[in-house]
Amino acid sequence: MILRGRALSAAAIALACAVPPSLATAATAPAATTRLVYATGKIVPIPASVPHEVGDMVDKRIVPDLRWIAQRYPIYVTDGYSGPLPSGEHVGCNGCHVKNSDHYNGLAVDIIPLDGDGRCDASWAAITRLAKWAEPRQNFPIPPFRWVGYNGDAGHGCGNHLHLSWNHAPAPQFQLAEWVEVFPVAPAEGGAEEGGAERPRHPRAPRPKQPSGPSGGISQAPTGGIGARGD
Ligand SMILES: [Zn+2]
């Protein structure tokens, strides 16, 4: 029993040390924990509190995070979910995302400055800060983000757009993922409304082991390489 107790303590210390320093120290960062939301997802309109192009939608489970971001960064979402609704209506841009894009699961957004004019100018400074917050080092996004497309990524960056994808269970395109990884948002910061039904309970929930197959139609791929992106 003593040995087991020591082993548990060691595990607890290891977990505590696993918090990325950039999250632990950055004043503007969310809580240094994330959680997996297993609540049933749904493609919903992006709320007015998150400036966006008319008609844009996302999986409701990332709405609290989006609202939190919009409260801190002057963002304008140009695309979220891209695909058909149960009604048959098409949402989002058509054919503008890569194969297996997280946009096809409603778990990615494309962002430009709220008051920009399309050029890479001072209006992008805050978007650049947001990109660096989500991905301090190229190709190493901080959870819950799965892929961040910005400077250094073809078709992305200042003057183009910032892409943010959330980690999620593998899911065929146009289907909702079983779980989504998010950063907890306090009720006062927009987490109490749609998509915010669950309160954070666990520090850094362990990520379920993902099935190794099947190939094709799976949107979650290893990050970092060509074709592994979620834009
Ligand atoms: Zn994108």
Image: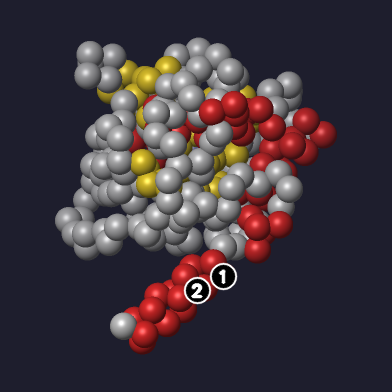
Instruction: Check if mark 1's residue and mark 2's residue have beta carbons within 8 Å.
Output: yes
Question: Within the image, what quadrant is residue 48 found in?
Answer: top right
Is disc 2 placed on a helix, strand or loop?
helix
For the residue pair 104 and 208, the one nearer the viewer reads as 208
Is 173 placed above or below 114 here?
A: below
Instruction: Give amino acid for label 2.
Output: Ala
Quadrant containing the N terminus is bottom left
**Residue 188 in view (yes/no):** yes
Task: Please give left or right for residue 79 compared with residue 176 in the image.
Answer: right
Kind of element beneath mark 1: helix
**Residue 25, percent from left and from top:** 71, 57
**Real-space CA distance between mark 1 and mark 2, rounded to the nearest whole angstrom:** 5 Å
Q: Residues within 10 Å of mark 2 (few under 14, many from 20)?
A: few
Q: Amino acid at mark 1?
A: Cys
What residue would you read off at disc 1? 17
Q: Residue at x 46, y 56 (%)?
A: 204
> Which quarter of the figure has residue 112?
top right
- Residue 128 image position (x, y, % from top left): 71, 43
Looking at the image, residue 155 sits to the left or right of residue 96; the answer is: right
Q: Residue furthest toward the left?
A: 214
Of 110 and 63, the residue lying toward us: 63
For image coordinates 36% across by 41% down, the residue present is 37
Name the residue beneath numbered marker 2.
14
Tell me the residue at 31%/26% (across/down): 42
- Residue 173, given in percent of the width and then of the height, sits at 27, 38
Q: Quadrant of residue 160?
A: top right
Residue at x-position 47% and y-position 54% = 203
Residue lying at the far right of the rendered structure: 122
